Structures are given as C-alpha cells and as structure tokens.
Amino acid sequence: MEAAKVLVEREFKVILFEKSNKVGGILNLADKPKFKDTTTRFIETLKTQIENDGVKVNVSNRNKRER
C-alpha cells in the first residue's frame, strides 16, 4: 500500500490486487493480540489514504495461473 501511495504521488494510475479478502498482507496477523489494535488502525488508515488518492483496490483476486 505504501508503494501504491508513492506511485500515485508520481502520477501513475495504480490498481492494487489482493489475493485475500482484505488488504494488509501479513500485517493482518500482527493485529491478533488485543494490545495490537494500533496495527489494525494503521492498515485501515493506509487503505483509506490510497483509496482517497484514487487507487483502485480489488480484494479476493487470484492470478489466473494460481487457479
């Protein structure tokens, strides 16, 4: 997501494809303990920022070769 932010700032059109049902990758595992709720907020903040910047986010997508 950070790379998407940088690319948008450099005026690229960005589409983010996520294999799972939500963005954040392995960071989503880091928020499992109750005291790690700041990780969840960080992921949601990044997602909101990139969507506001015009990045299209597609979740639950798999590469055709992986099917």
Image (cartoon, rainbow, N blue to C red):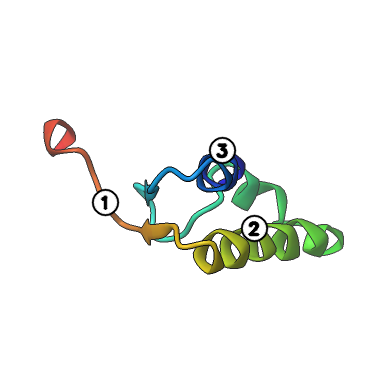
Residue pictured at 64% horizontal, 58% vertical: 46
Q: Are marks 3 and 1 in contact (CB under 8 Å)?
A: no
Q: Secondary structure at mark 1?
A: loop
Amino acid type at image mark 2: Leu
Q: Residues within 10 Å of mark 2 (few under 14, many from 20)?
A: some
Where, by quadrant of the figure, is residue 2 drawn? top right
Q: Which of 59 and 9 lies nearest the eye of the viewer?
A: 9
Pointer 3: what residue?
3
In this picture, residue 48 sits left or right of residue 33: left
Q: Give x and y (percent) for residue 62.
A: 23, 44
Pointer 1: what residue?
61
Q: Secondary structure at mark 3?
A: helix
Mark found first going from the N terminus, 3 or 1 = 3
Q: Residues within 10 Å of mark 1 (few under 14, many from 20)?
A: few
Amino acid type at image mark 1: Asn
**Residue 22 vertical position relative to residue 63 in the rendered view, above or below:** below
**Residue 58 vertical position relative to residue 64 in the rendered view, above or below:** below
In this picture, residue 29 sits left or right of residue 67: right
Mark found first going from the N terminus, 2 or 3 = 3
Residue pictured at 54% horizontal, 40% vertical: 10
Q: Give x and y (percent) for residue 17.
A: 35, 48
Foreground disc of the pair 3, 1? 3
> Disc 2 versus disc 1: distance between alpha carbons?
20 Å
Amino acid type at image mark 3: Ala
In this orientation, does residue 51 appear? Answer: yes
Q: Which mark is residue 46?
A: 2
Q: Give x and y (percent) for residue 20.
A: 38, 52
